[in-house]
Structures are given as C-alpha cells and as structure tokens.
Image (cartoon, grey):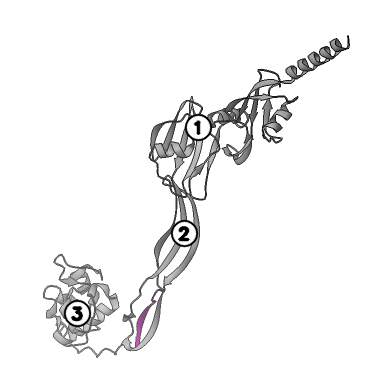
Amino acid sequence: MAGAVVALVLAGGGFAVAAAHKTVTLDVDGEVRTVSTFAGSVSGLLDQQGITVGERDLVSGRLRDGATIVVRHAKELPIVTADGPTTVWSTALTADEALQTLSDEHGEVALVVARAADGQPELPLDLTADGPAEVVVDGGTIDVTAGDVQVAAALAGAGVDLALEDEITVVPAGDSVQVVVVRVVTEEVTTTSEVPFASSQTDDPNRTVGTSAVVTAGVPGVRTVVERVTTADGAERTRELLSDEVTTAPVDEVVAVGTKPKPKPAPTPSSGGGSAPNPSGSAAGLNWAALAQCESGGNPTAVSKSGKYHGLYQFSVSTWQSVGGSGLPSQASASEQTQRAQMLYERSGAGQWPHCGPRLFT
C-alpha cells in the first residue's frame, strides 16, 4: 500500500512540472524567436531572457504555452508639427507606422532625422516594413526600395550626397513615406554702397566776386556691410548682421568763392549827334542782356547743335580759356560768363559776335 502512495506522489509531481513548462514565441522589436521557459510570469520570462523594459516600453501577451509575447522598446523621436519642433516617445518599428500613430494626435507631422558626429543621418526606425519610399531632393523625386531600409541606406541608394547643414525629414506620402532633403547653406555675404561726400566753401581773395572754382574734388566713400545669410533650397531663411562700417572715408569737396571786388567800369565816352556808342568804351554799360538773348535765348547752359559754342554768349572753348575761363562756359555761372564776355569785348570789340554784336548798343 505504501508503495502505491509513493507512486501516486511521483506521478502528481510529474504532472506539475509538465504544466509549468511552456514554449512561446518572443517578438522583441520585430526580432522573433521561439523560447522554452518554466517562468511563471511574463516579467519572469523577460528576466530569464535578459530583456529590460522601462515605463514607456510596451509589453503585450499572456504567458501560456503557444502564446506570443511582444516587446516594443520606446524610442525618443524629434518631430515637427504645426506648433513647431518637439520630441515624442514611440514604440513603432517603422517610420510609416510612427507617422500614422503620431498624425492621429498631432495632425500633420514630420520625423526629424538627426545627424551623427560624422554627418551621417540617424533615425532609429526602418522606413517601412515592406513598401516603397521616395527621396525628394534638389527639386526631384527618386523612388527607392525601402522595406527594412533606414534613411542612410535609402539616401545612399538614391545617390544623394549630403552637406553637414542639410536638413532631413521623413513625411507621409499616401501609402508610402518620403525622405525629404532640404539643402541648407550658410555663408557670409558682403555688400558695398556709396557714402556721399559733403561740400564746403572757402573765401578766395584772389578771385573776383561772383566767381568760384572747385579746389578739392569730392570723392564718395565706401560703406561695407557683412551679413551671415542662411538659405534653404535657395530661399532666404535668416539674415544676421555681422558688421556695418565705413571702410573708405569720403573726401569732401571744397569750393573757393571769390571775394575780390570787381573793378569799377571806366566812364562811357560821350557820343555825338545820337550816333552808336564807341565800341572802345566801357563794356559794363552795354546791353549784355540783349546780346545774350540774341545768342542763346538767355540760357546760360545753352550748347550749339555742333557742340562748339557754349553759354549765354556762345563762347568757343578756346576763346573762353583766352579770357581766363576754365572748364566749359556753359558750366560757369551767368555772372562769370558776363564778366568774361565783357573782358572779351574790351579786348576785341563787338566783332566777336558778328550777327548779334549790334544788340550791345540797343
């Protein structure tokens, strides 16, 4: 009888061991394997397998023979929404899965692809599980095979060379995803502009009142502005002022203005019997306004059609210079033109104006 009891106890013990043993499928972040365990709980199974889970991670399934236990470790993902950049935690395995989940909460959303120290793009998700994807770069779209492929491999397959400042995002595109590359360029831009010069006058006792001359020509200065400009796909994004200074100072113009009194006119010789005045008499007493009206219509800047004769009295340049003028007569003041016309008259008479000369005596 005692032997029968022992056999019964052993049989019962064998049944308990058999009931504790389980074969389960363990899916950890998409890596699936079959394991055997005597653990009494899911947490015990994970401890046996050396799998650590945190408060944001996802664990699903009941521990029983033939069950599937799913573990998804949460990943912190930088995203951009309509409200700006932020970070979220997601247990998705692929970018398209993450975008579908995040769009329910945030609306339009993009995953921001970080850059490693060597400049390589980093996103802790494959693009899709098995579907296609596209790379959008430099104004074009390139189809890539994206199943179980990460961003770096997709860009390499599309032949895209990245600069360090280029920005990369992953966005939904219908039934697939797009890897969008924005070319970002930051450079220093230098522009120059003219700084106007000032003008001042100085008295010149050696020049007659009513005359002037430029003794120091004005020269504009140079203003140089340096800015740091950032563009995204050719469109300006930011502009930062680095320096703004006058790199070449202007040279101010100096004009000498005559202060020497005009000589008093000689008395006009008397003329007898109402005859025309003596041409050798005082020039100041003649009708210079009438001569100017005849020669140029009274316009001190007038220039003949041939370009040879200038000013109120239609001087040639050589004649103008012969009475002390400089530059062009039509650029001198009306008073200086009249003064030099009187000097010419006193030297050579009214014959210098064959057609209009008689107007002097009207």
- Between marks 1 and 3, how big is the CA–CA gap? 87 Å
Question: Toward which corner of the image does residue 9 lie, by quadrant?
Answer: top right
Q: Please report the bounds of the magenta region as a residue range.
A: 249-261
Which-is-in-front pick, marks 2 and 1?
A: 1
294, above or below 157, in the image? below
Callout 3: 10 Å neighbours few (<14), some, many (20+)? many
Answer whether residue 272 is visible to the viewer in this image.
no
> Quarter holding the C terminus?
bottom left
Seen in the image, is 271 located left or right of residue 149? left
Q: Is residue 98 above or below residue 323?
A: above
| Type of amino acid under label 3 | Trp
Q: Which residue is mark 3?
A: 320
Q: Amino acid at mark 2?
A: Glu
Circle 2 packing at 10 Å, graded few (<14), some (14-19), many (20+), is: some
Of labels 1 and 3, earlier in sequence is 1
Residue 89 falls in image quadrant = top right
Number of marks present in the image shown: 3
Name the residue rendered at 19%, 88% in the picture.
281
Residue 185 image position (x, y, % from top left):
44, 51
x, y percentage for residue 143?
A: 40, 31
* Camera sees residue 35: yes
| Residue 255 x %, y % | 36, 80
Q: Which residue is mark 2?
A: 227
* Nearer to me, 60 or 267: 60
Membership of 259 in magenta stretch = yes
Label placed on residue 35: none
In this view, the residue in front, 239 or 17, is 17
Q: What residue sits right under mark 1 in the picture?
A: 127
The disc labelled 1 sits on which kind of residue? Leu
**Is 131 or 305 nearer to us in this picture?**
131
Camera-nearest label, 1 or 3: 1
